[in-house]
């Protein structure tokens, strides 16, 4: 999935305005100006469109974890240099403190049925033989299911 789309969808789901989005970025020591954010939130075909980097999205997701669950003791978590759908899926799950059964229910809201074992494969270490790469379809379904759940 495109990082900008993930940011846009999550921001819409949580009703975050531009100031709130900037505040969430700042929770992980990432400063985004209003002008940068305007360009990041534009559609892909807009000439002023600016791509959201993996580091920036990781910072936003780390900030979202702090926003939703509170700050932990110790140093701030460093944003990943490269993101995969698995990492994004896991960070959103952590931010919302969702357990496996809740994730499965959210996916079912979006029409995707997974078992616990299949779901756990997405959260395993990449070197584990049972690791499974999260597809754009699964991540998109998860975000869609969350939107349905939060609108209810």
Image: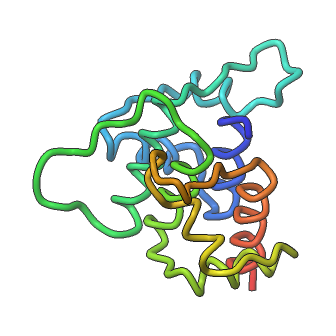
- Asked if residue 148 is positioned above or below residue 138 in the image, the reply reads below
Report the front residue among 115 and 97. 115
Image quarter for residue 75?
Answer: top left
Q: Nearer the viewer, residue 138 or 129?
A: 129
Q: Quadrant of the C terminus?
A: bottom right
Q: Position of residue 128 (x, y in %)?
A: 46, 53
Q: In the figure, 68 relative to 108: above or below? A: above
Q: Pick out the residue farthest to the front.
A: 129
In the image shown, does 83 or 40 lie closer to the viewer? Answer: 83
Is 57 rendered above or below residue 103?
above
Quarter occupied by the N terminus:
top right
Figure colour scheme: rainbow
The percent position of residue 90, horizontal first and vertical second, equals: 50, 59
Q: Write the residue at 75% across / 15% down.
A: 48
Residue under the point 23% across and 61% down: 71
Residue 41 picture quarter: top right
Seen in the image, is 27 located left or right of residue 68? Answer: left
Residue, far top: 47
Please report the residue visible at 52 percent of the width from the left and 54 percent of the height from the top: 129
Residue at (44% x, 66% y) in the render: 94
Asked if 113 appears above or below 30 in the picture, the reply is below
Q: Residue furthest left?
A: 74
């Amino acid at each position: 999935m495109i990082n900008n789309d993930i940011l846009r969808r999550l921001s819409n789901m949580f009703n975050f305005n531009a100031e709130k989005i900037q505040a969430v970025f700042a929770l992980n020591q990432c400063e985004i100006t209003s002008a940068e954010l305007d360009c990041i939130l534009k559609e892909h075909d807009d000439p002023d469109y600016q791509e959201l980097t993996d580091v920036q999205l990781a910072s936003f997701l780390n900030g979202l974890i702090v926003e939703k669950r509170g700050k932990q003791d110790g140093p701030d978590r460093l944003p990943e240099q490269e993101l995969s759908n698995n990492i994004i899926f896991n960070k959103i799950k952590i931010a919302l403190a969702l357990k496996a059964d809740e994730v499965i229910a959210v996916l079912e809201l979006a029409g995707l049925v997974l078992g616990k074992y299949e779901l756990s494969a997405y959260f395993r270490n990449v070197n584990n033989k049972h690791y499974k790469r999260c597809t754009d379809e699964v991540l998109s379904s998860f975000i869609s299911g969350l939107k349905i759940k939060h609108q209810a």
